[in-house]
Amino acid sequence: MRHQGSAATAAEGAGRTVGSDDDESGDAAPDDVARPSAAELDRYAVTPAGSVRGFHYVDGELHAERAALSAIAQRFGTPCYVYSRAALVGAFREFDAAFAGLPHLVCYAMKANPSLAILDLFASLGSGFDIVSGGELARVQAAGGDPRNVVFSGVGKSDAEMEAALAAGVLCFNVESPAELDHLAAVAARMSVRAPISFRVNPDVDPRTHPYIATGLRESKFGVGIDCAHALYRRAAAMPSIEIRGIDMHIGSQITELAPYREAAAKMLSLVDALVGDGIVLSHVDFGGGLGTRYRDEAPVAIADYAAMVRELMRGRNERLLFEPGRRLVADAGVLLTRVRVVKAAGERRFAVVDAAMNDLLRPALYGAWHAVDAVHPRTEGAARYDIVGPVCESGDFLAHDRMLALAEGDLLAVRSAGAYAMAMSSNYNARPRASEVLVDDDVTHLIRRRETFAELIAQETRLPPQSAR
């Protein structure tokens, strides 16, 4: 993929044909719509913080960089996830540059979006990776990432996953319970190696986010309580197959305030200092991730403000810094492209039934999450309030409620901020093949995951033998 370096380049006109070596069929978008000017509709080229967003209107049509989304839909079909390389690169570089001059490693939390192409791109930028399973480690390796820059989190690592990670030479295991420490020590001893560890410390701080993604409270399943962490470090220090390297925290996701971070980090660093009294000197401090992004009207913490807080807390200290951003790097770099199949009314409600569904974007049904929805070719007349719903056989199958849009059958819609926890959480519910993924680099498209086929959905299954089926 060609390097894409500036917001100005990404926002240039798009009068060129979208190019790719791979095609998928799809219906063409209708072309008989009124199109507002680019000046009226270009709201998304740059974030409030000044970083590249990657999606913007040109002559009344929504583009990914210089590629028209209608052309992508025609070539690859819908639903389809579309990512901007410029936005991905811009987000990573903004985060990484904020800590220039400090020893640090940005470990992308790949659960947000584990696409091989995105992992490959981040690895080329010098990223490490935060993983939570053996499958994610395999993806890092398949994408050319360096296991020596991998931190392995998660509360339920299996012995087989521990063995694979030790064989690969990961940077660190973020240990989340006394039992896990014992299992890891036994696995490492069998392999005649020492397992590098940090403890994921639970500081009992309320991150003020959705309860499903709050992970730093006392009752959370994640991490070890800060009140017992000191004793666990002493215990680990006496284990011959364990090598203590650091400390880790992760208090939640979609956090939009600095205060919870500051409180949690202060507790963590106090523990680091207390450990020195026992001769336990840590080489790194992992601040975790969880920085929020703007889906609707949130006011996310600016990276510069977050970095200033970290620099203040770390003044006079020598530990290497680790970070685990996920959503913040990829959410705004993607949209879910979908087509309106049917427009219908039920009482006083209007529904736009689209070809994407909760199996393509689970967040609205799971969390009640809000995603902006914009027409690829906005109409100037006939706006009404619609619920944007999918074809899955569930009343909870919706992408958005009560949105003011002018719609007709065949229109293309872009569901925003679908770069994180969209494809990553997708499923085959209702026997629906998972959608394709496309990455745009300037005006060139790359099909980075083709659409699944129905044959692939049943390829791992067998029917019962004839005598058993009766």
Image (tube, grey):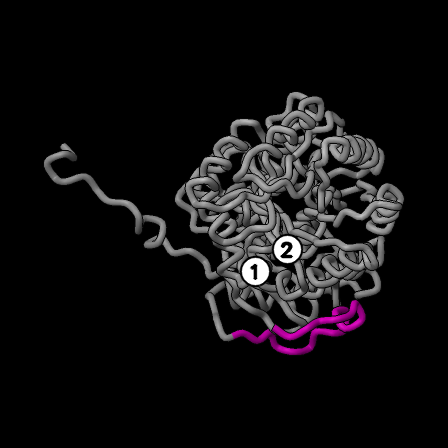
Is residue 175 positioned above or below 441 on the image?
above
Is residue 145 positioned above or below 133 on the image?
below
Q: Which comes before the other along the chain, label 1 or label 2?
A: 2
Mark 2 lies on a secondary structure that is strand
How far from the left and from the top, in percent, is residue 4?
71, 71
Report whether 450 appears left or right of 90.
Answer: left
Q: Is residue 34 visible?
A: no
Q: Name the residue under label 1.
A: 145
Total marks drawn? Answer: 2
Q: Quadrant of the C terminus?
A: top left
Mark 1 lies on a secondary structure that is loop
How far from the left and from the top, in percent, is residue 346?
58, 34
Residue occupying the point 58% across, 63% down: 120
Residue occupying the point 53% across, 51% down: 341
Q: Which residue lies furthest to the left in this view?
A: 467
Q: Who is closer to the viewer here, 226 or 86? A: 226
Q: In which quarter of the image is residue 68?
A: bottom right
How far from the left and from the top, in percent, is residue 256?
79, 39
Q: Which residue lies furthest to the bottom in this view?
A: 16
Residue occupying the point 68% across, 47% down: 324
Residue occupying the point 88% across, 48% down: 308
Task: Decide: few, some or many residues near mark 2? Use Cα within 10 Å; few <14, some 14-19, many ≥20.
Answer: many
Q: Give the range drawn in magenta.
A: 1-20
Q: Mark 2 points at which residue?
A: 128
Asked if labels 2 and 1 touch by Cβ distance under 8 angstroms, the answer is yes
Q: Who is closer to the viewer here, 67 or 378? A: 67
Residue 17 part of the magenta segment: yes
Q: Quadrant of residue 264?
A: top right
Task: Decide: few, some or many residues near mark 1? Use Cα within 10 Å; few <14, some 14-19, many ≥20.
Answer: many
